[in-house]
């Protein structure tokens, strides 16, 4: 063979390695796994397991400075739940999980869009009421399309989905993970308040995990949560 071929091969390998390194160093690159966050990932898993054992909803607020791996860690927890749902395998004890949804609040510019998105994501999880919600949400939600009546109707339908009827403990849990959850405050704090309060109610199916940077988000914008027993547990990411 030609004596130049080995050098071409080595050059191609080196260029391929450099391309991979450049891609990994890019700010938009997301690693497959995150080192040194096993404790936080375990805390998320324990929280979800506790909610399953209790057969009821609950809320956790994940916070810490930017760049500490909050979103990626929660995404890993979400991917584990999705894999479990796809394999139809679930723990032998505790409530099953019907849906596991990951949203970014930057894409939810208003309360109406949030409620309609939740109906679209959770709409098939609760028989007749869910089917009605699915119809209401089928049209793609647009920021300027959620008039007051439509937003109120969507909110009422979501409430029916996430809260079990009194005396009825059926229905799997609905896990909702919301990144940049502080963005929900931009249109007023009502939607943020709804999510945390619904998750804290005794007949709730909603397991809420919210992610943001501010450590005192709920204290600043939702001071009544603690007084009403609806304050979430907090998972703070250290530097």
Image (spheres, grey):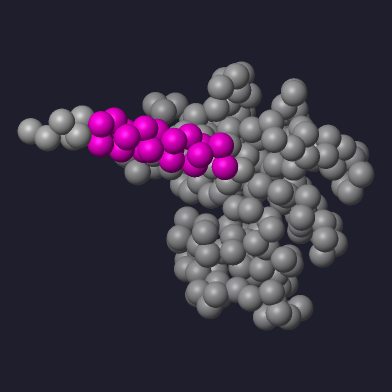
User: Is residue 11 one of those drawn in magenta?
Assistant: yes
Nearest the camera: 124 or 28?
28
Quadrant that contains the C terminus: top right
Q: How many marks?
A: 0
Q: Quadrant of residue 12?
A: top left
Q: Which residues are magenta?
A: 7-26
Is 54 contained in the magenta span? no
Pick the quarter of the image with the N terminus.
Answer: top left
In percent of width and height, residue 206 lies at 62, 46
- Name the image quarter holding residue 188: bottom right
Left or right: 7 as drawn, with respect to 108: left
Residue 233 falls left or right of residue 33: right
Place of residue 185 in the rendered image (x, y in percent of width and height, measured from the top left): 82, 56
Q: Residue at x 69, y 74 (%)?
A: 143
Residue 29 drawn at (x, y percent):
54, 42
Q: Is residue 64 left or right of residue 176?
A: right
Report the residue that reaches farthest toward the left: 1
83 relative to 65 in the view: left or right: left
Q: Residue at x 59, y 64 (%)?
A: 117
């Amino acid at each position: 063979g030609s004596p130049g071929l080995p050098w071409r091969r080595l050059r191609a390998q080196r260029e391929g390695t450099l391309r991979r390194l450049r891609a990994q160093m890019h700010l938009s690159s997301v690693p497959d796994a995150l080192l040194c966050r096993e404790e936080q990932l375990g805390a998320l898993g324990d929280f979800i397991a506790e909610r399953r054992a209790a057969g009821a909803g609950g809320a956790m607020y994940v916070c810490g400075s930017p760049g500490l791996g909050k979103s990626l860690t929660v995404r890993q927890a979400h991917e584990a739940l999705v894999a479990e749902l796809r394999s139809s395998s679930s723990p032998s004890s505790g409530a099953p999980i019907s849906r596991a949804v990951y949203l970014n609040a930057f894409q939810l510019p208003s309360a109406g869009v949030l409620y309609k998105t939740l109906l679209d994501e959770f709409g098939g999880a609760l028989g007749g009421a869910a089917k009605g919600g699915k119809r209401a949400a089928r049209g793609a939600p647009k920021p300027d399309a959620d008039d007051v009546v439509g937003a109120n109707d969507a909110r009422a339908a979501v409430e029916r989905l996430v809260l079990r009827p009194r005396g009825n403990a059926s229905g799997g849990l609905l896990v909702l993970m919301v990144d940049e959850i502080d963005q929900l405050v931009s249109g007023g704090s009502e939607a943020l308040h709804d999510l945390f309060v619904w998750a804290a109610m005794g007949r709730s199916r909603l397991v809420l995990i919210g992610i943001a940077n501010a450590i005192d988000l709920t204290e600043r914008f939702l001071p009544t949560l603690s007084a009403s027993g609806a304050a979430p547990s907090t998972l703070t990411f250290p530097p």
